[in-house]
Amino acid sequence: MCFHRRFAAAVLLAVLPSIAIAEEKSMSLWPGVPPGRIAAVGDEADTTGPDGREVAGRPVIRLGNVSSPMLTVYSPPEDNNTGAAMLVCPGGGYHILAYDLEGTEVCQWLNSIGVTGILLKYRVPRPRGDARPIEPLQDAQRAMSLVRQNASRWGIDPERIGALGFSAGGHLVARLSTNYQKRAYEKLDATDEITCRPNFSVLVYPGYLFDRNSDAFSAAELPVSSETPPMFMTMAYDDPVDPENVLRFSIALKQVKVPVALHLYSSGGHGYGLRRTEQPVTTWPDRCEEWLRSAGWLE
């Protein structure tokens, strides 16, 4: 068993003892060498040092040097499977992936509400000097099409596949949700003929959604339209990444009449995943589940 699955299993057993570990199905995204660049300079590994920041009193797996992108499917029990699924994109500034905090633990929560979690391990770190690399978008587009291609095999409704991202992963989901009409790479095979548009999207404390230099929404990078999927967004007002990310993006979506559920909390900072603390911002999964149910995605 590779290290990240071994670490994930250990963490989940400790954090979620009442929930059975879901069966995992892993798949490489690309039939050969991925398109674009690979900036990894070492072996894929947990890069957390002895002084790594903990979240809610527990460590975080900071997966680095990802050169072989893949997806891992976490399926809920058959008697609790709604048919809905979500592609999960961890954050990490496009440097690393917060693999358990914003990945495996999220898939387990999705399983608890009857949703299949598909964890995307996209390429990191970003190439030097490139704040918004194209390679993660290539990986996300390919992953979404692969999920639809395998929907019947994995017990998924191909018309109820969403995307959920945190921090830089939230930015990646925003890009995927607005850049689905054209591939960020040359099409390779029949998989790339399948749409990569999410049916709905969830952005949790996303970054990079507006240009700090011009103080404007990143419209060129995120071309919203009336066909952009409905969205749930959440952030804390004191988030150092800046809540203007969700405020500006939600206004842009409103202007094209895309339904948005926006939850802005007074405090809570950044990078909490769904680990509960005394901060009200960590109740966002409850609000998200309510939104998913009210929109009919969990029927």
Image: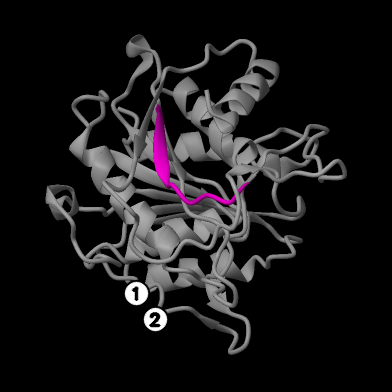
Please name the amino acid that badge 2 sits on. Ala
Image spot of residue 63 (x, y percent): 62, 44
Q: Which residue is mark 1?
A: 223
Per the rendered image, the range of residues in magenta is: 64-73
Instruction: Tell me what residue is drawn at x 79 percent, y 32 percent.
Output: 58
Q: Identify which residue, 106 or 159, lies in the foreground.
A: 106
User: Could you tell me which quadrant the C terminus lies in?
Assistant: top left
Q: Identify which residue, 45 or 233, lies in the foreground.
A: 45
Q: Which residue is mark 2?
A: 220
- The answer to whether residue 192 is above or below residue 180 is above
- The answer to whether residue 130 is above or below residue 171 is below
SS under mark 1: loop
Image spot of residue 39 (x, y percent): 53, 63
Crowding at dot 2, Cα within 10 Å, few <14 / some 14-19 / many 20+, comes out as: few
Q: Is residue 17 left or right of residue 258?
A: right
SS under mark 2: loop
- The answer to whether residue 44 is above or below residue 138 is above
Q: CA distance from mark 2 to mark 1?
A: 6 Å
Please name the amino acid that badge 1 sits on. Pro
